[in-house]
Amino acid sequence: MVRTSAVITLAVVAMLSSTNADAQYFGRNKVRYDRLEFRLLQTEHFDIYYYAEEEDATVHAARMAERWYARLSRILGHTFARRQPLILYASHSHFAQTSLTGGFINEGTGGFTERTKSRIAMPFAPGLGETDHVLGHEIAHAFQIDIARGVKQDAFALPGWFIEGMAEYLSLGPANAHTSMWVRDAAGHDRLPTLKQLNDPRFFPYRYGHALWSHLAERFGDGVIGNVLRSRGKDAIKRIEQVTGESSAQITAAWHESIDEAVPDTGERRAVGGERRSRMQLAPAISPDGTRVMFLSERDRLSVDLFVADTANHTDGRKVVSTAADPHFDSLQYINSAGAWDPTGKRFAMAAVQDGDAVLVLINVADGSRNETRLPEVSQLFNPSWSPDGSQLVVSGLKGGLSDLYIYTVETRALRQLTADPYADVQPAWSPDGATVAFATDRFTSSVDELRFGPLRIGLLDLKTGLIRPLDERSTTAAVLPDKEINPQWSPEGSALYYIADLERASNIYRRHLTTGELVRVTNEQAGVSGITPTSPALAVAADSGTVAFTAFTNGAYRIRIVEGCGACAVVARANLAPITAATEHEMTVADALRDPTSGLPQSDTFTRRPYDDRLRLETVAQPFIGGGTGNAFGGLVRASFGATFGDLLRDRQLQTLFRVGTDLDDFAAQFAYTTRRGRWNWGATAGFAPARFYGARRAIERGPEATTRETTSLRYDHQWGGLAMRYHFNAVRRLDARLGVRRTGFAWQTSTRVTDTTGNLVNQTYAESPAHAALYQAEAQLAFVYDTAVSGPVGPVLGQRLRLEVEPAFGRVPFTDVRVDARRYWMPIRPLTIAARLEHVGRYGSGASDPRLTPLVVGLQTLVRGYDLRTFAADACGRTATACSVLDELAGSRLALMNLELRAPLVGLLTGDLDYGRQLPIELIAFADGAALWTKNSTGASDRATFRSFGFGGRANIGGFVVEVTGARPIDRTPHGWRVGFLLRPGW
């Protein structure tokens, strides 16, 4: 279960991604840049794993975790059956390195609760208030999993809107302004889903699920949540129907009736280009003269990139920084950060993550050149803002899990800390006179002692005195004010501040005059002005012209709008708000619990600190499998496989075991693999034994007047091995693979003889096994360099390049060295067409290169050159009238050259003109040409060569995560000539 703090990084961006390199030939690397030394903090119900850098923040999180346990235990009527593990990271860049999941963690993931042991893993957010929300969301998942287990259910089988929406309700309370923005916008565009439609990925499960559970709790009380979780209904909707006593149609009608529709927006504003191909235009930053705007977008559907566009026309603009096939940056931080133009409009500053480090990037807008500075003093940087003279920038930095303000000096590249406290200090903006920094903070609405977090409000930091005061003095009241104030931006003359607030029905832009206190509403977006999250930056004001650029949420998309002046502004009278009240003695509701910061909040002196115990413990047991043989081949009639995985709690070290047993010697196999992943160096050890078979290595047929005898001989390999494997990650796209080991390979011929009469009926069948070659004992080594920038779609790569250079020597009585060069390139000259090319050479060199005991180079011929397979190749090579043929002899070759060329395009994309695979069944059409040559040089220097060439067309489809390739191929170097249909279960190469 993943808690995503983003709305969507868009389904297409999720589908178009890079693959993980763990145990793969190619693939990008999940790099552990930082060697984190974990410790254990124990509370009454939690085992919390942390490291020294984040200790102060961890103590706050531990108190919050126990408070969440008390709240949710009371609301849901449930207690944990065992202690709950919680792993905390000081920043998202550290969190992205976790070993708890082998997959990549994108920027939108704010935490997750994994399946095996319900371990919660999450980073500290930029602000303890948001950390508290994510923590509550994930602990709600832990309760859901524990309750489901108690009634023999699987919480992970429940749909996202059910499980994630419920966790949002339990951690946020009744639908807030951000959730209301989503459903109000959907209602205004006739896109509200029914309960049955909520499973459609078009409807973001967090927001629509939150809205639905808020509605159900309002109508039926919070008790409906625990009752639905304990229900034994066959699916999520049946559970709700069973508990509420209403049909899904009735619930849908009442839910839709409760939602206010958005009315048409008012006010003059212009759009920025590229909307047709994009659903996200985020983090606007407008040039001082108001003519250009920088923004982040997934417009090319490959990644979230930085674009610049003119504000005066509707052109698409141009890309400034890309993270798809250019892996220079790990992240452009599109959720929590926006960039800034310098006062001259010639430089642009942005915060990014590079190789796990915070980096400040200064871009020369004219030529695109970049000046990058790594800042190890902080884990992450956000929202740079220039000083009026362009010599310094003020930034928000995350350090030890807490956010503060810093000043960066361009000339010296020095970073100086301005604030140092547990409060959230984000989105700074330097005043035109250079004396003040405006920023968003929760210091006026929060209490560190009570860990009570109110909304962000605008604060003003006097750079000379260091004093901080609120923009609105009423922010200092003890009341928890329901409206947020974020993203401050100065007016050109410095007399007023623009910011985003929830003062009225929706998030909009307001302007407050610093002297008179007059407050005016600048925009009237009926859905809302917002970035991905409620606190994401979404506003920019031109330093000279005063032109306003902002991101509006409309029709399910984030669009940048431009406003000149303030012709549609309306003066706002802000009402006083009532203070919070503590929960009463009646049955606690979610709203009560969230208003009460002290109930269940322990003191930190009750916590115990211990060293991290990294012993291996049972992690998972593989599902046992029992199968039966047919009795017409070697191997037993009954086979069974089983295994187990052991690991430490952080999964930095793992031991995997796998066994296969049966009623025949051919059935027995075992493998043991140990791995450790605690830094750039990953290493492991492996040992095992397993049989393998080259089926049909030799064939013979003898036809008589009364019977036909067919003899099929397979070569059985008996492998035993042991060794060490190492991997060093330079960065996300470059690595070294190395291996050292020993291997014994035994050989035996296994012959099946079938005798049939003239009508084809089986007369007799026998099996015999005889010795083959002498066993082969070898020491082995491998060294490979891998480079991979490929971006993959749902069925294969579409952009980037791949390279593998590999040397694999073997030592012993049969010395040889395998050398491999595998280069692949993917271009997209015209969207959505991809040209894919592969050149590969495998050479076996040395005195033992031609030894018949070595596995042939082209065992998987049909996967290399479509239209060919070993059986038909042998028939062509030996002659179709031959009575005996050795495939092994015909495949003998110590050199292989391969070339593949493909033209790829998504079926839906051909209709839309974009890189679009559709919503249901991703299908890709292909046209291809394949060619290969296999040869051996003899002692005279002559070559014995076999060639394979074909061309054809076909398609690939991703069916439930499995990629099926169907092709029609016309071989050139085989007889008879004709088209061959092929089926492969593999993604595109």
Image (cartoon, grey):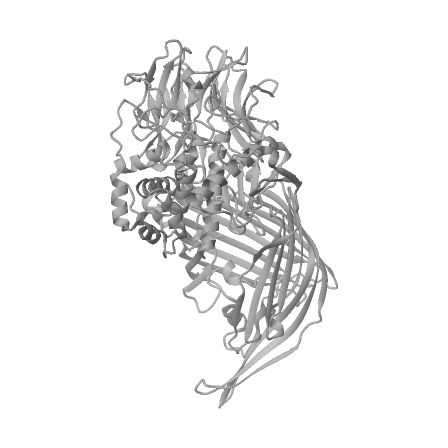
Query: In which quadrant of the rendered view does residue 280 lie?
Result: top left
Q: Nearer the viewer, residue 336 or 880?
A: 336
| Most distant residue in the bottom direction | 706
The residue that appears at 44% across and 55% down in the rendered structure is: 153
Q: Nearer the viewer, residue 88 or 408?
A: 88
Q: Is residue 329 visible?
A: no
The residue that appears at 65% across and 54% down in the rendered structure is: 674
Q: Percent x, y for residue 807? A: 66, 52
Query: In which quadrant of the rendered view does residue 936 lie?
Result: bottom right
Looking at the image, is 801 positioned above or below residue 696?
above
Left or right for 135, reference 592: right
Q: Nearer the viewer, residue 533 or 424?
A: 424
| Most distant residue in the right direction | 813
Q: How many marks?
A: 0
Q: Percent x, y for residue 785? A: 63, 46
Looking at the image, is 898 positioned above or below residue 112?
below
Left or right for 178, reference 450: left
Q: Is residue 135 visible?
A: yes
Q: Percent x, y for residue 510? A: 35, 20
Looking at the image, is 40 positioned above or below residue 641?
above
Q: Percent x, y for residue 410? A: 57, 19
